[in-house]
Image (cartoon, rainbow, N blue to C red):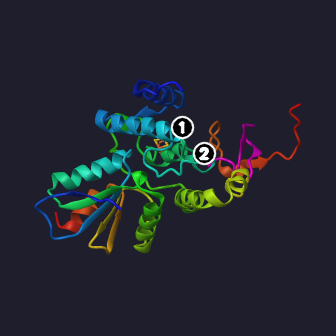
Amino acid sequence: MTEITLEMVKQRAEADARTYGYYLNPDPKFLQSLLEGLKRNEERYGYPSCPCRLASGKFEIDRDIICPCDYRDPDVAEFGACYCALYVRKDLYEGKTEVKPVPERRPLEKQSKAYNAATTASEAKPATPTKEEAKPSGSKPKLWYCKQCGYVVFRDEPPYTCPICKAKKEMFAEIKTRIDFT
Amino acid sequence: MQFSKVSGQKRQHKVILYALSTCAWCRMTKQFLEDNNVEFEYVYVDLCEEEDKQKIRDHIQSKGGPLSYPTIIVDDNMIITGFRTDKIREALGL
Ligand code: SF4
């Protein structure tokens, strides 16, 4: 595996901010600690999960909080910053609006999975390892499409908002067509 | 569960801080308590054993708090979620 450097993490965040018209947190120390947190999470979990949320270490469960998380766009739109305040709006970047803590938008049931998942995993391991692996959390990934812009995503649930056109979750519908990849 | 203790002059309240080792708001909160000379104990939840994570979740939820960090519990009855200096000041009389 290639080594993850702080510079890589930073460049990725900068590129993403540029693409979406956001800015990174203007406080260098604050920014630095978030980037270090992302690096640390990528090292220990294999993906850069949100530094300000407890991850389960299981990809399927943490998918919505992999940075940039599902909640970033609605949070920046409503509060001017994402939950961690890594990504901020222009007026906050320029110091015209104060950067304040943002309330948690991630549903509680998803949050508590980070605690349950880990425990069920450690309890289930010695007894029935194969059964657990086949069914990670009771749900199966499906194909979903955004009725507004056509974006397609393959996961258990549609995203909180569409990452392309920002349509709400309700705008997603399941694609029921069978596709044979042969 | 291994709590780390930070000594301070202000010891009127028992202050517990649940934090994540990677979170910038948690760092700010810890720094704020230190700067204000508050004595407190903290633990990084993401570095805990699974069993302890459950205990922490139960503790936070038993006080009616959401499962987000930083969480401060004052005298085992008052809970403050997030870096809210106004609330911390009020609860600790700073
Ligand atoms: S809240 Fe911000 S830093 Fe955390 S995952 Fe979402 S976009 Fe990334």
Horizontal and vertical percent position of residue B4: 26, 56
Q: Is disc 2 placed on a helix, strand or loop?
A: helix
Percent across and percent down for residue B15 are 25, 65
**Chain bearing mark 1:** A
User: Residue A155 in magenta?
Assistant: yes
On residue A175, the disc is none
Q: Can residue A91 be seen in this view?
A: no
Work out whether A71 lies above or below B76.
above
Q: Is mark 1 on a helix, strand or loop?
A: loop
Q: Establish if A57 lies above or below A40.
A: below
Whether residue B4 is visible to the viewer of this picture, yes or no, is yes
Residue at the image position 38 percent from the left and 36 percent from the top: A36
Image quadrant in which you'd find residue A118: bottom right
Q: Mark 2 points at which residue?
A: A59
Asked if the residues shown at circle 1 and circle 2 are in contact, with their CB atoms under 8 angstroms apart, the answer is yes
Which residues make up the magenta segment? A140-160
The residue under label 1 is which amino acid type?
Gly
Q: Residue at x 62, y 39 (%)?
A: A163
Q: Residue furthest front?
A: A126
Q: Give the left or right position of residue A109, taking residue A103 as reference.
A: right
Q: Which of marks 1 and 2 is nearer the N terminus?
A: 1
Q: Check disc 1 and report the residue beneath it.
A: A46
Given residues A113 and A125, the one toward you in this image is A125
Which quarter of the picture shows residue A165?
top right
Does the Cβ of the disc 1 residue fall within 8 Å of ligand 1? no
Parent chain of label 2: A
